[in-house]
Amino acid sequence: MAGETLGRSGGYTPAQMVAEAEKHGFKASERLISDWAELGLLDVAEKSGRGRARGIVRTRSEHQLDLFLSLLRQRQHGINQVGTLANVPVFIWLNGGDSYVPVRQIVRALRTWSDRYAKAEWSNAKGAALGSIAPFIDPAATDGAKEALRLALAAAMNGDGRFDRLRVESLLRAVIDPEATGRAPGPSGANVTPEGVAALLAARFEARARARSGTISEAELRDARMLYLYSHAAYAKEQPGLAADFRSRGRFAAPALDEVASRACLDLLTAVGLNADRQVVTTNQEADGAATRPPSQ
């Protein structure tokens, strides 16, 4: 924009961001910036006065410019779906915090990801339904049992967020332990049980529904970020031993950075759900304790 001297610490106007994008060989527009801000791919602009009777100027930080260029780079590589692109700001926030991407933006990015996830075509939902649990399916599981689980999970993915935890647990048992041995696959300390997987999926689906309704607070997101960072650090420490255990059957591989980044929204919502589930359990235990405690003298 003619006459503007902003940039770096002074922020970038939409016109300046478009100009920077063009310098890097990307096609962009101010409308694209506005659309992406509404979806949470970018933050809303900061407003500041030009001076008396000179109006206001809307700018974004240098970190937001870097994010904009990263998104354009992903789009140049063929990643055009906004739901997939929502992983970019979330991954940056998970690893860099509010100084890189503000948490208010993450609320909108998660809603965008969850909306697109819920609106997935039935064929896509059905194809992806068993993805996260495929490594734990027992070779003896029947095609019928696997199809029943696939349909149940796809219906939850493609529907309104309702999740029948007990039914899914039963269906999981038919594919994880089809011969009812009572044994849980996986190495010691990382056993996979129908109850554990059902609880994880239930927490994930509940958090996704809350993301769509905008009822996840910023405080919850910050707590979930701490759980995410802790769990990833713990897994990185334990992964070599888990992968080497003969009971792993090729599971527990070290994930590539691109894979971790592509799961950012899913992993953050999983952490939100697990924290919420833990809070419910704690609250119920406290209520049970209060109910059985003798009245004070």
Image (cartoon, rainbow, N blue to C red):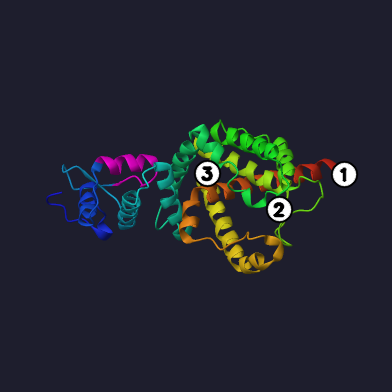
- Between residue 41 and residue 188, name the one nearer to us: 188
**Distance from the alpha carbon under mark 3 to that under mark 1:** 36 Å
**Distance from the alpha carbon under mark 3 to that under mark 2:** 31 Å
Q: Is residue 215 visible?
A: no
Would you name the residue on which mark 1 appears? 294
Q: Which label sits on residue 124?
A: none
Where does the magenta region start and end?
31-46
The x, y position of residue 113, in whole percent, is 46, 42
Depicted 62 relative to depicted 127: above or below:
below
Amino acid carrying mark 3 in the image: Ser
- Identify the secondary structure beneath mark 2: loop
Task: Using residue 77 as the reference point, say whether residue 275 is left or right of it.
Answer: right
At x 50%, y 56%, the residue is 260
Quadrant of res 143: top right
Would you name the residue on which mark 3 appears? 217
Q: Is residue 34 visible?
A: yes
Quadrant of res 284: top right
- Between residue 176 and residue 215, name the one nearer to us: 176
Sequence-first disc among 3 and 2 = 2
Is 42 part of what is drawn in magenta?
Answer: yes
- Identify the secondary structure beneath mark 1: loop
Sequence-first disc among 3 and 1 = 3
